[in-house]
Amino acid sequence: MTTSTVENYVKQLYVEQEANPGEMVLMGRLAAAMEVAPGTATSMVKTLADAGLADYQPRGGVRLTSRGQQLALHVLRRHRLVELFLVKILGLDWSQVHDEAEALEHVVSDIVLDRIDELLGYPTVDPHGDPIPTSSGRVHDPKRMNLASCPIGRPQRIVRVLDQNPAFLQFIERQGLMPGTKVTVADREPAADAVRLRLSPKRETTLGLAAANKILVEATATA
Amino acid sequence: MTTSTVENYVKQLYVEQEANPGEMVLMGRLAAAMEVAPGTATSMVKTLADAGLADYQPRGGVRLTSRGQQLALHVLRRHRLVELFLVKILGLDWSQVHDEAEALEHVVSDIVLDRIDELLGYPTVDPHGDPIPTSSGRVHDPKRMNLASCPIGRPQRIVRVLDQNPAFLQFIERQGLMPGTKVTVADREPAADAVRLRLSPKRETTLGLAAANKILVEATATA
DNA sequence: ATCTTCATTTTGATTAATCAAAATTGATCC
DNA sequence: GGATCAATTTTGATTAATCAAAATGAAGAT
């Protein structure tokens, strides 16, 4: 039996590994991310290792095994399908579904998940633009530019927002920068921590660099 | 914080009290119902008592306090709304939703539950005909006859099935005896453990007494 | 080569839920 | 008034997850 706690650690490890590909995840990082004492992380990681979900090198860090990775992807699939379901079918706000899904992801059965998947038309991304792994554990996750790095003056479409914080998401929504929106970077002033965006001929807005970094875009046909 | 386990004990106590109104629930009964060792029931009941959810008389039994009753009703509300949701919106079979709901009932938030309630049009009964308590913890649960006790030869409508066992529910479904169906008891032969039912002028079927007892009905206008 | 520092690991406790098995209590039965 | 029996409670352990605080170790600093 894999507990909710194990699922959460595995999921977090996956996220940390994505952020720093190839590197081992250090206990300090993991403990901070999970908001537990360092010793707790150490002992849970040993549990994961015993369960064949992770490789652990004392004082060297952890890395998911491929079984661990598969489990992480299944949890992420549940999480993201549930999020989309909460927005599309139940009409919840995209800024609040992350926390709801955090609880539901450990409890929805495969049958329920399949029904949700079907009802939503086999979607590939959740409301934040995060990719939904397939049931066999594959993810399509293309490299993307963000509003702090994409070319200036070329039309882009926002495809993903890399932050689940409700306050941040609400801010993004107020700025009209949700996934799907078309924007063009008018200019950047790194010294002033500012990125000026044009949403339409009449509408523009400014973002800090940290925020701009979290908003991923895709170049669109210059229409 | 009230744990899933506490919610389950409280819910079970509520069910036991419904079955035997006025009486205290004995530890043996509770332990059997929860499928735990007797000592476990004793110690959990003390926990409930400390939390103000139950009154406990050593060697005398337990009874829910009104706070315990309120909690039980909230859990039942979650359970039954979720069941109906799984059938109506996700298209699951009524015979399998009980077990799914058993897990989900501890995890759906008030916001999600309100959305489900609204989406379903504020229903009053779940797929088995069990009444759904209101969010303020009221239940409308009229006394009912069953197929083993209702008058013979008078048309009835099936309104509730008192058993969550998937195999039993599938059997009921195969017999065409789901809630909403109209039936007339043709006759009963207690000695043969048989209740003969007429579903339509051409369709009839036979049921054992134990099964007949679990199917609640309401007299319909003789149409 | 030793010292210092800081991350990590260990150790010892704690909480919730559980079990097995021993102790207790009430009630019933000569 | 015991003796007996069944239900209940107690006791002592166990597992998962956690923390605080003490011990350890590896790396750089002198």
Image (spheres, coloured by chain):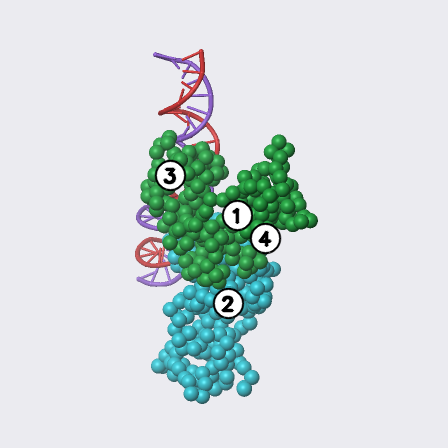
Chain colours: A cyan, B green, C red, D purple
Provide the chain ID for the residue under circle 3: B
Q: Amino acid at mark 1?
A: Glu
4 and 1 marks on the same chain: yes
Q: Which residue is mark 3?
A: B63
Provide the chain ID for the residue under circle 4: B
Provide the chain ID for the residue under circle 1: B
Q: Amino acid at mark 3?
A: Arg
Residue B151 lies in quadrant: top right
Q: Nearer the viewer, mark 4 or mark 3?
A: 4
User: Separation of disc 4 and disc 3 at Cα?
Assistant: 45 Å
Between residues C11 and B82, which one lies in front from this camera angle?
A: B82
Q: Could you say whether the residue bearing mark 3 is in a helix, strand or loop? A: strand
User: Separation of disc 2 and disc 3 at Cα?
Assistant: 43 Å
User: Separation of disc 3 and disc 1 at Cα?
Assistant: 31 Å
Q: Nearer the viewer, mark 3 or mark 1?
A: 1
Residue A88's disc number: 2
- The residue shown at (48%, 61%) is B121
Total labels drawn? 4
Residue located farthest toward the front when viewing the structure as drawn: B222
Q: Amino acid at mark 4?
A: Ala
- The residue shown at (42%, 74%) is A173
Q: Could you say whether the residue bearing mark 1 is in a helix, strand or loop? A: strand
Residues tagged 4 and 3 counted as in contact (Cβ below 8 A): no
Residues tagged 1 and 2 counted as in contact (Cβ below 8 A): no
Whether residue A178 is visible: yes
Mark 4 or mark 1: whose residue is earlier in sequence: 1
